[in-house]
Image: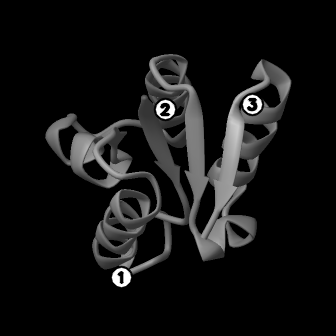
């Protein structure tokens, strides 16, 4: 199983810590699964617009069956879009 982490990045100075905590929580709850952590993946990309990051995020989500929503997801326009995308695609959603 592959799990995508969704949460607030823009305007969150602690996003790397939040997403790392998410990885730890996923492993604790689900065991040995593959995790796509956009906080890590996006760090390898050139600077993009918000819309370009979102297109990339939706492509990453296509590779997963499950989405793990960090506590702060409602504070993020992008994470809210990812939540809606997960619902529309019938993905399993787990909340922190």
The answer to whether 44 is drawn above or below residue 59 in the figure is below
Question: Could you say whether the residue bearing mark 3 is in a helix, strand or loop?
Answer: helix
- First of labels 1, 3 by sequence position: 1
Label 2 Cα crowd, 10 Å radius (few <14 / some 14-19 / many 20+): many
Question: Which residue shows up at 46% across the image and 77% down it?
Answer: 12
Label 1 Cα crowd, 10 Å radius (few <14 / some 14-19 / many 20+): few
Q: Which residue is mark 2?
A: 57
Q: Which residue is mark 1?
A: 14
Asked whether the residues under the numbered discs 2 and 1 touch, taking CB atoms below 8 Å apart as contact, a structural biologist would say: no
Q: Is residue 57 left or right of residue 19?
A: right
Q: Is residue 82 left or right of residue 3?
A: right
Q: Residue furthest left?
A: 44
Q: Which mark is residue 85?
A: 3
Question: Could you say whether the residue bearing mark 2 is in a helix, strand or loop?
Answer: helix
Residue 70 % position (x, y): 57, 67
Question: Which residue shows up at 37% across the image and 66% down it?
Answer: 28
- First of labels 2, 1 by sequence position: 1
Residue 42 % position (x, y): 28, 43
Q: Disc 2 to disc 3, how far (Cα)? A: 10 Å
- First of labels 2, 3 by sequence position: 2
Choose mark 1 or mark 3, whichever is in front. Answer: 3
Q: Residue 85: which quarter of the image?
A: top right
Q: Disc 2 to disc 1, how far (Cα)? A: 19 Å
The answer to whether 19 is drawn above or below residue 11 in the figure is above
Residue 29 % position (x, y): 47, 62
Return the residue nearer the eye: 19 or 9: 19
């Amino acid at each position: 199983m592959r799990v995508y982490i969704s949460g607030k990045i823009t305007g969150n100075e602690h996003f790397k810590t939040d997403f790392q905590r998410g990885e730890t929580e996923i492993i604790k709850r689900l065991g040995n699964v593959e995790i796509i952590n956009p906080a890590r993946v996006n760090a390898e990309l050139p600077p993009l617009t918000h819309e370009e990051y979102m297109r990339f995020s939706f492509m990453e989500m296509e590779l997963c069956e499950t989405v793990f929503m960090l506590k702060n997801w409602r504070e993020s326009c992008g994470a809210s879009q990812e939540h809606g995308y997960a619902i529309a695609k019938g993905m399993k959603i787990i909340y922190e």
